[in-house]
């Protein structure tokens, strides 16, 4: 039985921020920067930073982002993978079960599958989206619980969110993916990598 490896998607497998920032700035008429979204900062608070008089609710912002960005094939098609990701994932898929555990809403599963099939077709065993819009409310669950409940041996979890790495500490070895050195001066004892080519030597 193959062992399991878990990857976050946005900011880990794919460099979504340039496209996401473009979307947010055009849709909400703001001038946000990639650093505004570090560690999964909610888009509502980014909008309020640049438009203090913004009247929409947190739910309305998430709903708009879902329908106009996450569920948009046009926007998703613009997103590019990080260097070496595709090649590394293809090689790892021969020896491990690879899972994507993403903060994307489950409602956008079709476009998420489209994105993965475009870049790493046939390599991903399954996708876990950690929240969903249901009947005017947000239903959510945790990456930690998905990984914890996965049967079989857990080899590695990789995410660009420091808070998610900290949560995983008790169940699986974890790496903080930090391609832009956002956490290079962070004093916490967290294993950090900056490129996909660093992953395979760690597994040897």
Image: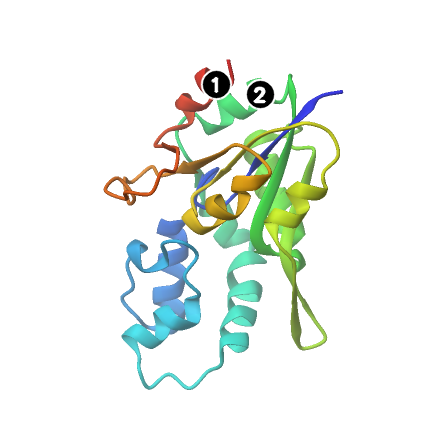
Residue drawn at x 41%, y 69% as measured from the top left: 27
Q: In this view, does 142 lie above or below 9?
A: below
Secondary structure of residue under mark 2: helix
The quarter of the displayed image where residue 21 is located: bottom left
Residue drawn at x 66%, y 75% as measured from the top left: 137
Provide the residue designation for mark 1: 200
Residue situated furthest top in the rendering: 204
The quarter of the displayed image where residue 151 is located: top right
- Density class for disc 1 (Cα within 10 Å; few <14, some 14-19, many ≥20) is few
| 65 or 94, nearer to the observer | 94
Contact check, label 1 and label 2, Cβ < 8 Å: yes
Q: Is residue 200 above or below residue 174?
A: above
Residue situated furthest left in the rendering: 185
Provide the residue designation for mark 2: 92
Choose the circle earlier in sequence order: 1 or 2. Answer: 2
Q: Is residue 20 above or below residue 64?
A: above
Residue drawn at x 42%, y 86% as measured from the top left: 55
| 59 or 25, nearer to the observer | 59
Marking on residue 54: none
- Density class for disc 2 (Cα within 10 Å; few <14, some 14-19, many ≥20) is some
Residue drawn at x 59%, y 35% as measured from the top left: 6
Q: How is the image coloured?
A: rainbow
Secondary structure of residue under mark 1: helix
Q: Is residue 120 left or right of residue 42?
A: right
Q: In this view, does 96 lie above or below 100?
A: above
Q: In this view, does 99 lie to the left or right of 22?
A: right
Residue 90 point in image, percent of width and height = 57, 22
Residue 64 point in image, percent of width and height = 53, 70
Q: In which quarter of the image is the N terminus?
A: top right
Q: Is residue 188 left or right of residue 84?
A: left
Give the alpha-carbon distance from disc 1 to disc 2, as whole Å: 8 Å
Residue 187 point in image, percent of width and height = 28, 42
């Amino acid at each position: 039985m193959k062992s399991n490896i878990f990857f976050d998607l946005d900011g880990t497998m794919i460099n979504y921020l340039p496209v996401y920032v473009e979307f947010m700035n055009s849709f909400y008429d703001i001038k946000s920067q990639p650093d505004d979204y570090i560690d999964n900062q909610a888009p509502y608070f980014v909008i309020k930073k640049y438009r203090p008089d913004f009247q929409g609710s947190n739910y309305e912002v998430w709903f708009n982002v879902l329908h106009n960005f996450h569920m948009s094939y046009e926007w998703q098609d613009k997103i590019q993978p990080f260097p070496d990701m595709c090649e590394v994932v293809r090689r790892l898929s021969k020896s491990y079960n690879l899972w994507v555990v993403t903060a994307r809403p489950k409602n956008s599963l079709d476009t998420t599958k489209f994105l993965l099939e475009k870049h790493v077709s046939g390599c991903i065993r399954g996708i876990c989206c950690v929240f969903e819009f249901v009947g005017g409310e947000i239903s959510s669950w945790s990456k930690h619980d998905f990984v914890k409940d996965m049967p079989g041996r857990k080899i590695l979890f990789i995410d660009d969110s420091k808070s998610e790495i900290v949560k995983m500490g008790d169940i699986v070895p974890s790496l903080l993916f930090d391609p832009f050195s956002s956490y290079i001066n962070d004093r916490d004892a967290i294993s950090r990598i900056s490129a996909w080519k660093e992953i395979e030597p760690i597994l040897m």
